[in-house]
Amino acid sequence: MTSDFFQKLKVATSGILLFCSTDLAVAESSHGIAMYGTPALPHDFVALPYANPDAPKGGKLVVGNTGGFDTLNPFAQKGTPPWQLRFWGYESLMGRSWDEAFSLYGLLAESVEVPEDRSWVEFTLRPEARFSDGSPVTIEDVIWSYQTLGTKGHLRYRGFWSKIAEIRQTGPQSLRISFNTPDRELALIAGLRPILQKSQWQDKDFAASGLTEAPIGTGAYVVDSFEAGRQITLKRNPNYWGKDLPFRRGTQNFDELRIDFFGDQTVLFEAFKAGELSSYREFNADKWASAYGFAAVADGRVVKSEIPHKRPTGMTGLALNTRRAPLDDWRVREALLLAFNFEYINETITGSAQPRITSYFSNSTLGMRPGPATGQVSRNLMDFAGELAPGTLEGYQLPQSDGTKRNRKNLRKAMALLEEAGLKVTDGALRDASGEAVAFNVLLRQGDSEMKTVVEIYARALERLGITLTPEPVDNAQFYERQSSFDFDLTRIRRELSLSPGNEQKLYWGSASAGQQGSRNLMGVTSPAVDAMIDRMLSVEAPEDFLAATRALDRVLTAGRYVIPFWSFDKGRIAHARELKFPETLPIYGDRTGFMPDVWWYQQSQP
């Protein structure tokens, strides 16, 4: 072997030469990594396929949020930050291409290395990587970021930390993370942890920073000014270190990004119509067709753009808190699904223009197939046959009404199930065995007028079953606090799902997260079958085995009746000032994080 070969095999720590022929024989440094196979883009790619490398720089984008904010730290558990902050001002070792199921390319890291079994991952930092204050990004910063986020950060970061066996520096610009569990996705998750500056937090409480200061990051944008709860402005750093990287070419084009905050969605929309905002995302197809006849659209100052996608529907609807009786009984949950007159509600809210979500991964190849489980999907579930909800193996389909307001047939079925579960109507109210009336609250975000209308229609249907349903609209801070402590019977849920689901599934519906305050498992799912399917998804190597595990997971969740699903967002709908442009080539994920404002630009219209 040549001396060059051995030079590549060196791992240095404090000047000591370490050599591990077993690891290095199967590992190879690369510019990117994919969950399965190899990344689509070559090492010498010029720009992401959905970015315009010639996009001009300049201009301002103003968007609106409802509610407010009480912290500038998007990585701590405490407080409510503007949700955009963690995407606009911070970077990770690698960046994701939204035109592939799950592929990452070097960002702060210039290369990544993994063995065949992905039991560890090694990153080599770019020597030119800098924080926004001009200081270099060091291995010490990276290791501190993993440890701090894993122990003091938001819950979404802590699960990964528990799977790290060792994290150590292996050279002046490199580090290796070894894992304590077989999980092919961990190497990719490692590449997506935000990197923060260690020295900023000396003698400071990272977990309680609030509005005192924003964490220093490496991203193109930094907080310029803010008015607590009302607006925040970020400006592009003219000395941003990564502006010439191929991964960044044609992205982050605006000079200024501003977020204005409003009491509710109605006021926000009026502000857009008045020209105070640059863009507005519309999630209601009926409003898209009927509410955009105002002057700015008619004369071309506002453009309506539709962004198709190929991602799963994910799950949007009303989460049922199974930690509370009688919602812990699948028959009660099925009765609530039967009483939810989707066809009538969908016609009222969206003009029936948006199709219903039929399962968590519907609209994609990952979704469960109709009818009984077959093949590997069936084999995956057979060990749990005795504990699965009815319909999981046999085939389950959401209840469908006749579209009329009364929904009599489904309500009769619902009442039969409620009686089977030991609930009976006495003195006009549905009561349990102790005589207590069945009543549910629905936790809502204040100002969500569409959701309030849905709940009001639903409440009238449940009245016919003797059930009282009470909407409880609260402000942003209370909404997040009560969701975090699972203080609700029903609440709105939105979980976007990717074409490469992985560890985030444990956060969404894994048993370990069901009792963990602040977790995203709002329904309180505790299912050995769910846990096993997620573990299988993370351990299998063959794409067909991954597909079977995901379809099996989809069956267990859907037949578990944990959520009352709403309509799907079949395409992105963005109304925007005509000066805002985006590339003709769209990513397969469509209008998702990484699309707007990342690849948009400002171009002054001709008079």
Image (tube, rainbow, N blue to C red):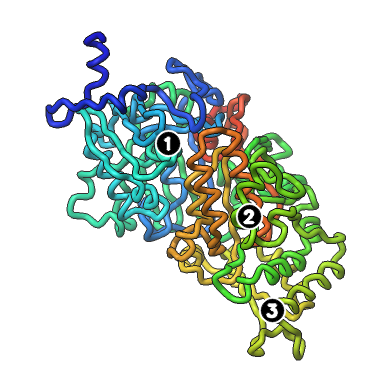
Q: Position of residue 213 (x, y in %)?
A: 30, 51
Question: Closest to the observer: 226 or 349?
Answer: 349
From the image, state whether disc 2 or disc 3 is nearer to you: 2
User: What amino acid is at disc 3?
Assistant: Thr
Q: Is residue 249 above or below residue 414?
A: above
In this view, the mark in front (3 or 1) = 1
Q: Is residue 425 above or below residue 33?
A: below
Image quadrant where one finds the N terminus? top left
Cα–Cα span, label 2 and label 1: 26 Å
> Alpha carbon of mark 3 to alpha carbon of mark 1: how far?
47 Å
Q: Are the residues at dot 2 and dot 1 in contact (C-beta closer than 8 Å)?
A: no
Residue that label 2 marks = 556
Q: Marks 2 and 3, how far apart in space?
A: 29 Å
Front residue of this view, candidates 594 and 152: 152
Residue 147 point in image, percent of width and height:
28, 48
**What is the three-letter code of the residue carrying label 2?**
Val
Closer to the observer: label 2 or label 1?
A: 2
Residue at image coords 27%, 13%? 5
- The picture places residue 220, in percent across and down from the top left corner, at 38, 34
Query: Residue 294: image x %, image y %?
Result: 72, 45
At a point 71% along the width and 36% down the height, the residue shown is 299
Give the residue pinned by disc 1: 188
